[in-house]
Image: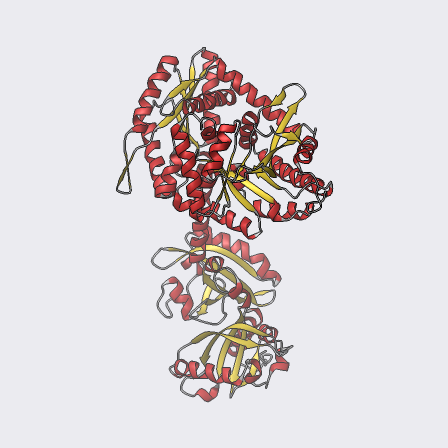
Amino acid sequence: MSPAPDPSDPPALRQALRELDVIMANAGVGIVFVKARRLVRCNQRYADIYGLGSPEAAVGRSTLDLYISQEDARSLGARAYPALAAGETFRCEQLMRRLDGVPFWAHLTGRLINPEDPADGSIWIADDVGERRLADAALAELHAEQQLIFDHAMVGIVFLRDRRVTRCNRAFEQLFGYAPGELDGQLSRAWYLSDADWQAAGDACYAPLARGDAFHAEMVLRRKDGSALWCEVRSKAIVRGDLSCGSIWITQDISARKQAEQALVQAKAQLEARAERLALFDGLTGLPNRHLLADRASQALDIARRCDEPLAVLFLDLDHFKNVNDTLGHRAGDALLAQLAGRLRGAVREQDTVARMGGDEFVLVLPLTDVAGAAHLATKLMALAGAPFQVEGQELTVTPSLGIAMFPTDGDDFDTLCKCADAAMYRAKKDGRNAYRFFTSEMQAQSARMLRLENALRRALERGQLSLHYQPQLALDAQGGAARIVGAEALLRWQHPELGWVSPAEFIPVAESSGLILPIGEWVLTEALSQLRRWDDAGLPALTLAVNLSAVQFRHRDLPALVARVLADTGMPAARLELELTEGAAMDDPAAAIATMNELHARGVRLAIDDFGTGYSSLSHLKKFRVSKLKIDQSFVRDLTDDAEDRAIVDAVIRMAAALGLETIAEGVETEGQLDFLRRQGCRAVQGYLFSRPLPAEAFAGFVRARAPAPTADNPAP
């Protein structure tokens, strides 16, 4: 560092050298004096930054050793020279290297010692800013750069003795709004807000400074004009343990950082408030969500119980709302829901609660509302919901279905009332939609039945209550020859020890609504293909097996991978499997359906449209669907011999399929008359009770063997 003070030196010089030593030793940045591109003197921090060991080891070293390349050194010199020659301070961030060759980013601040004679050298302040450069930009804005000692443009430096200013740099004067020299000799009280603050600061710093320790604090100080600013102050006695020689104070304005911190605190509070609102209110409509609804309903029910008052719970769901999203997009659908929420909110009293459960389903909790009042409001809401909506320049009309449950008649708790209102709403939909229904005992019995079925179905797989029956599928001979068995359709059956045989028409919807259809569907696929393998091993002819997919299964993104895995596990070729899905499942999301069909087709799996003619397929979509077969629904086959319209529909389906290169199969064939008509129209495959009802696996194998042609020399037995 600087040479030790000579006792013969003037006191002012000795004091100056001590002050310089303190600055160099306590600066949080590297300080170096450079002359003719060589290091003349530096502090320990500078030696640490560049890996030079000690300030003594750094003396005489070329500055070129500290750059990545000589070109970098020349480039920096070219950029710095104009500012330095003009007597200005030069600042930059430069990629440097340590003595061991490791690169790092440094913030450099330089100035000529004597602008009139550059040969006198320059002083540079360096700081390693690699970590700051890598830090998050938002956090970087909240923290001031590490203060640069002895740089008047960035930090203020003041020397105090007996709490009076002996000298300060221009940055300190500018920080507090004083003219050059105006602070000389003044008490430090000048930049404190009050006598109490000044005294408190003196009390806080005295002990550490007297011990020779550094003092560090953040405090609110005052400019000359009276305005307040946050400052970070660092101080140390010039002579360790001797405050009579004074102290040095390095002061930095951190108001921006404090403001940023305060802004972050406010932002956090706002985010917490927003999160709390999102937790309780629907983001689209601003209505209470299911959590807030449950809380308000609980309070309303408590009052209704204590006061023996009626209360109504009303479920409202829009009919065919999906068509709005599919046709105009979800933005239009959201706009319609937001408008509907406003209408519902405006139709009820202050004590009523209108909530959105999700999708297009709304729930209303109506205290002090009897049956007549609920019916009156339901009629009013139907009119409001059915009135035209203006959405994106278009007029849209929708209809609602409503279900109503009454407290205490239909239930004593909110969950029960919700289930009852939901059941009543679905009855309104079943009865043709655009209506309201009150919950009844009949619905209650049906709900209880559905709940019992769901609970029983959850254990049906593990208890071995599910099984597969197989209905033969036969190919027709165009010339009237005998039909031959070419495949089978796997049909799920459930025999419960108490409920007996449960119809698939009853338990499949329960499985779909409860999510059980996914594990059950996987079991069906695995068991069906495993049975097909067993038939092959037993010598039966190579048959194609049709397995039905529910809409829930078909929409699941893992379906193609599941099918591929089961085929691999059972060792069956994909060409022997045919997956059947309904028109409704395919048309629910045509784009997604096409993507799934393409992936299954690429794996070699055949697809068929089940119950064709009962859905809403368009020819444009049918052409894009990767299907190989259309299955004519039995509702058209049943009255073929007596109903001209059914005959025309079946004939049109067969002709259309032929034009598209698709096969057709008719289900529900029960009479010879139906069979003859189908054969004449060109249908080449059938199934139905005319040939066989669905059979257990062993009985199906016997049926196949019984119809197999007698062995001949050209056609030996397997």
Residue lying at 47% horizontally and 30% vertically, measured from the top left: 637
Question: Compared with residue 301, is residue 393 higher up or lower down, i.e. above or below?
Answer: below
Would you place residue 448 above or below residue 469 in this image?
A: above
Q: How is the image coloured?
A: secondary structure
Asked whether residue 183 is in view, the answer is no
- Tell me how many marks there are: 0
Horizontal relation, residue 385 to residue 162: left or right: left
- Residue 547, image x and y in percent? 58, 38
Quadrant (top left, top right, bottom left, bottom right) of the N terminus: bottom right
Seen at 52% across and 41% down, the residue is 608
Q: Does 413 sit above or below residue 28? A: above
Tell me residue 257's x, y (percent): 45, 57
In the displayed structure image, the side of residue 497 where residue 38 appears, left or right: left
Within the image, what quadrant is residue 23 found in?
bottom right
Most distant residue in the top direction:
308
The residue furthest front is 713
Residue drawn at x 38%, y 36% as measured from the top left: 285
Task: Specify whether residue 59 is in view.
Answer: yes
Work out which quarter of the rendered image holds the C terminus and state it: top right
Q: Residue 154 at x, y = what percent?
A: 44, 68
Q: Nearer the viewer, residue 523 or 231?
A: 523
Instruction: Tell me where residue 246 appears, x and y as whole percent.
Output: 53, 66
Residue nearest the observer in this picture, 319 or 362: 319
Along the line of sight, the residue nearer the viewer: 180 or 186:
180
Which residue is nearer to you in this view: 679 or 454? 679
**Residue 225: quarter of image:** bottom left
Query: For residue 648, which quarter of the picture?
Result: top left
